Image (cartoon, helix red, strand yellow):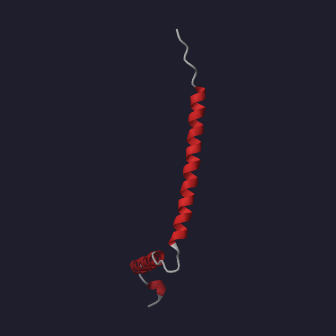
């Protein structure tokens, strides 16, 4: 049978199974830890997390100080 005469349902099924097989292979490759040193990766992510935490703390501290400076001093009666 000519490929152009195959029904649409067959093409959908072929594409679905191809995508599913590619997904399974990608998932298996993702979880294959052969040759990957996790300690270095974890240290890099830890360093990134620390930098983000320091940046967020300095940003919120600056915003808090800016808001505190904008509040007028109370005046007694």
Residue at position x 47%, y 86% in the image: 3
Up the image or down, 73 lies above or below 15; here it is above
On the picture, is 38 further left or further right than 10?
Answer: right
- Which picture quadrant has residue 67? top right
* Image position, residue 25 (x, y; %): 45, 79
* Image position, residue 31 (x, y; %): 45, 75
Residue at position x 56%, y 35% in the image: 64
Up the image or down, 22 lies above or below 55; here it is below
* Image position, residue 26 (x, y; %): 47, 76
Residue at position x 41%, y 79% in the image: 17
Q: Can you name the residue that lies furthest to the top here?
A: 77
The foreground one among 42 and 11 is 42
Circle count: 0
User: Which corner quadrant holds the N terminus?
Assistant: bottom left
Up the image or down, 56 lies above or below 38; here it is above
* Image position, residue 5 (x, y; %): 45, 84
The foreground one among 64 and 22 is 64
On the picture, is 59 further left or further right than 15?
Answer: right
């Amino acid at each position: 049978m000519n490929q152009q005469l195959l029904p649409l349902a067959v093409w959908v099924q072929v594409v679905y199974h191809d995508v599913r097989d590619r997904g399974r292979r990608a998932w298996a490759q993702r979880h294959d830890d052969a040759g990957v040193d996790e300690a270095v990766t974890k240290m890099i992510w830890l360093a990134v997390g620390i930098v983000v935490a320091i940046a967020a703390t300095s940003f919120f501290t600056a915003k808090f100080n800016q808001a505190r400076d904008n509040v007028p001093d109370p005046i007694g009666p």
